[in-house]
Amino acid sequence: MTDNDPAEDVLATLRALRAADPPTHGGRVLSYVYDSGRADLDRVAAEAAELFLPVNGLDPTTFTSVGVLERDLVAFGRSVLHGGSDVVGSVTSGGTESCLLAVKSARDRARATGGGARLALVLPTSAHPAFRKAAAYLGLDLVEVPVDPGTGAVHAPDLLAALDDVAAAGGRVALAVVSAPSYPSGAVDPVEDVAVGCAARGVDLHVDACVGGLVLPWWPHDLPPWDFRVPGVTSMSADLHKYGFVPKGASLVLYRGRDRHLAQYFATSSWPGYPVVNPTALGSRSAVGMAAAWAVVRTLGEDGYADLVARTAQATDHVRSALRDVPGLRVLGDPVGPLLAVVADEEAGPDMRVDPFLLVDAVRARGFLLQAQPAFPQPDGTVVPRSAHLTLTPVTLGVAEELVAALAAGASAVRGRPTPQPDPTLVERVAAEGLPAELAPVMATLEALPREHSPALLAQLLAAVVDPDRGQPGPHALARGEEHGAHGPSAAPPGTTVR
Ligand SMILES: *Cc1c(COP(=O)(O)O)cnc(C)c1O
């Protein structure tokens, strides 16, 4: 290395930037990241990714390697989700793209036979926002069905009644959606009952298993059928880059029937260039995510996944049983898999209750990042309570005692403290100064905003982060290497201003 090797300088800056991120390994961040705890998987993924960096997945007839990888991953996905030879699909860049494409396929098929009726997407309020985005991008009416605020799951008769309401109003349902499980609470919707009703009405049903698709197949506790074993399920999404433990940038969308898959494609020869066939939303298509995914799936195999899921389930059981002994809070409903929402126990007196937003701040100060989820008023007037979300992974097992201690101590520190009040002046201050270290008042303010105002505000906040004239690092991150107590702002790494 020489003193003026520009590549070394560049990489040193990148390392400094990464050092300011929260730790992606070790189980301290209980959302966003999925750590298998196996260094061999990280290595094989990195080498596979490097091999495929220059490849363009746009054309698998030119880069035949990409076609092989995709075929193998689709075969693996349909096998673990119990699809037969009539189930086919694609590898996409992530769950959002998988959901978007499932909706696009359903919309185009409905349009072809719909005689111009308005088309609707019918989903529980707990369905991932990717479906709201799909409805917005693809011009569908969105019909939200309230979930049971006590369990987080939708009741099948409610969803089926919504299908009938659309028909009674002269519209058509392009697609119904349920989740296995939904992200906010970890509840698995009643797939079988919904599927029977959808099939009777001739409505296609998507099971969003983005987060559950590679963990529920090996979950050791009983659960009702939720995948392609259920006859009325016509499409599914399953993210490789969540519990598949592959780097970000890989998901599966699968369809029952080749016609449904084909309706996902965009093809045209209406320009002076090469004939265009885009299976997914992208044109030029990185093969990096697919190659890394293929390498990890091959290395792990079904037995490898079963082993990682067993560890995840053990960690989940441990944390759930420990939470039962913490007064003032409880787990929402009875989630099946490794996702939990911790809510205030309304049966405890106000002096004993633990506010989830305050809990998130208190637990962060003790070395673990939970995710604050605002209360959600539903169309029927019921409210899904505010919560602290935990996504548990195999590495949670190694830190389970520490996590449980942090949850218990954090709860004790804030027990009986009243919920922070919304503060409208906070919005401007956050826009000007960035996020404060204590996020509870920010979350309380966001929660109280009229729902029609918050999207613009959230967009402004996030746009400011990447605005060359305004961007500043968030001060609240749990810096890498800090074992306990991420108090106060983490210093900005050197050379973060790129001009
Ligand atoms: C993560 C997730 C998605 C969206 O996936 P991204 O990969 O984040 O785009 C969709 N549905 C559920 C249930 C999810 O958990």
Image (tube, rainbow, N blue to C red):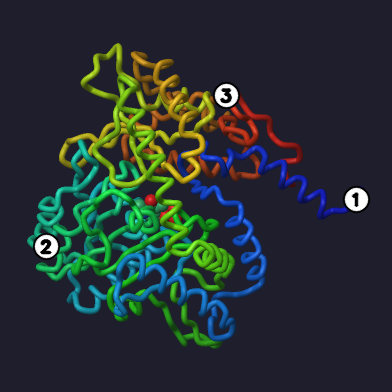
Mark 1 lies within 8 Å of ligand 1 (Cβ measured): no
Determine the image quadrant of residue 23: top right
Q: What residue type is labelled 3?
A: Gly
Determine the image quadrant of residue 468: top right
Determine the image quadrant of residue 379: top left
Mark 2 lies within 8 Å of ligand 1 (Cβ measured): no
Residue 232 at x, y percent in the picture: 19, 68
Q: Circle 3: is it few (<14), some (14-19), or many (20+) Cα within 10 Å?
A: some
| Residue 424 seen in this snapshot | no
Left or right? Give the position of 59 relative to 78: right
Where disc 2 sits, the SS reads helix
Q: Residue at x 19, y 48 (%)?
A: 154
Q: Earlier in the sequence, mark 3 or mark 2?
A: 2
Where disc 3 sits, the SS reads loop
Residue 245 at x, y percent in the picture: 50, 55
Asked whether disc 1 touches disc 3, contact meaning CB atoms under 8 Å apart, the reply is no
Q: How many marks?
A: 3
Residue placed under numbered mark 1 in the picture: 4
Q: Which residue is drawn at 13% across and 64% down?
A: 196
Residue placed under numbered mark 2 in the picture: 197
How many angstroms separate mark 1 from mark 3 (CA)? 37 Å
How many angstroms separate mark 1 from mark 2 (CA)? 68 Å
Q: What residue type is labelled 1?
A: Asn
Residue 209 at x, y percent in the picture: 34, 57
Which residue, as the protein is rendered here, is positioned at the far left? 168
Residue placed under numbered mark 3 in the picture: 485
Q: Which amino acid does label 2 sit on?
A: Gly
Left or right? Give the position of 385 relative to 267: left
